[in-house]
Amino acid sequence: MSGHSHWAGIKHRKGLNDAKRAKIFTKYGKLITIAAREGGGDMETNFKLRLATDRARAENMPKENIERAIKRGTGELKDGAEIVEVVYEAYGPGNVAMLIKCATDNKNRTLGEIKTILSKMTGKMVPAGSVSFLFKLVGAISISLEKDINQATLEMKAIEAGAEDTLFDDNLLTVYTKIENVQKVKENLEKENITIDNAGLIYLPTQKHTFSDKDKDTYEKLLEALDEQDDTEEIYDNL
């Protein structure tokens, strides 16, 4: 099992103040609503909903917020325009390939705002299919490494649980799976009393890209600006 396939992956920025926490709750609420609309409100049969709910709970999203988001998705609660998921393709500074996943109730507004942010940071939106071929959709499970953890033992447990690949990066182990196996692998790991930080489907780059320090600085600013945009859920790149 190779440890050399990198996940540039999702750029998480967790806020501590009330305003940022409210924004996080809004974003997870959208994910829950979309998952409930697509697969129903039963977490036993809707794995996407269970994953979204687990992520929201990890951020201490209130139970009533979660329940309201589920009801909005199932149609039990009608209080606004339908929320849809869309993935925009773009090139950022230094020609880094980007997939920007958004959840929005107004695609025209979101598209315009994402385009404006990109253009200010020497990036540009590109037509569908222009960069998505540089990524593949896979299952990914994140596990924080405890101080006394034996990495070799943990990796072996991941392999036995059904992992396709693994990556140790700082204090995090990412376990990669086939799309259809992410739920089973997650459950197998939990049976071994392994705490899961995050699990879901991500876009993994199949080709890597590097750029200059100058482009790196600009790109970090671009990520911050996109993260502040209300509809942006996840950002993937091929760095």
Image (cartoon, grey):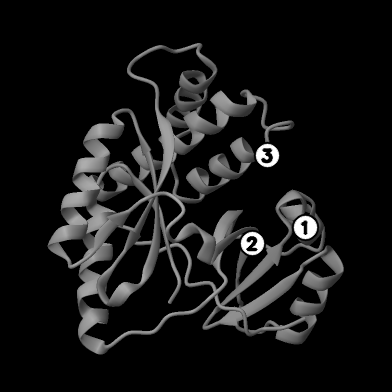
State the separation of the CA atoms marked 3 and 1: 13 Å
- Residue position for label 2: 141
Q: Residue at x 82, y 72 (%)?
A: 159
Compared with 101, 172 (above or below) is below
Extreme right residue here?
Answer: 160
**In the displayed structure, does residue 199 sit left or right of residue 80?**
right
Amino acid beneath label 1: Val
At label 3, which amino acid type do we have? Phe
Report how far apart the C-alphas of labels 1 and 2 lie in the structure: 9 Å
Residue at 25% x, 88% y is 213
Q: Locate the C terminus and report the quarter of the image it occupies.
A: bottom left
**Residue at disc 1, secondary structure:** helix
Horizontally, residue 50 falls left or right of residue 127, namely right
Q: Nearer the viewer, residue 220 or 192?
A: 220
Residue at 31% from the left image edge and 42% from the top image edge? 231
Residue picked out by circle 1: 185
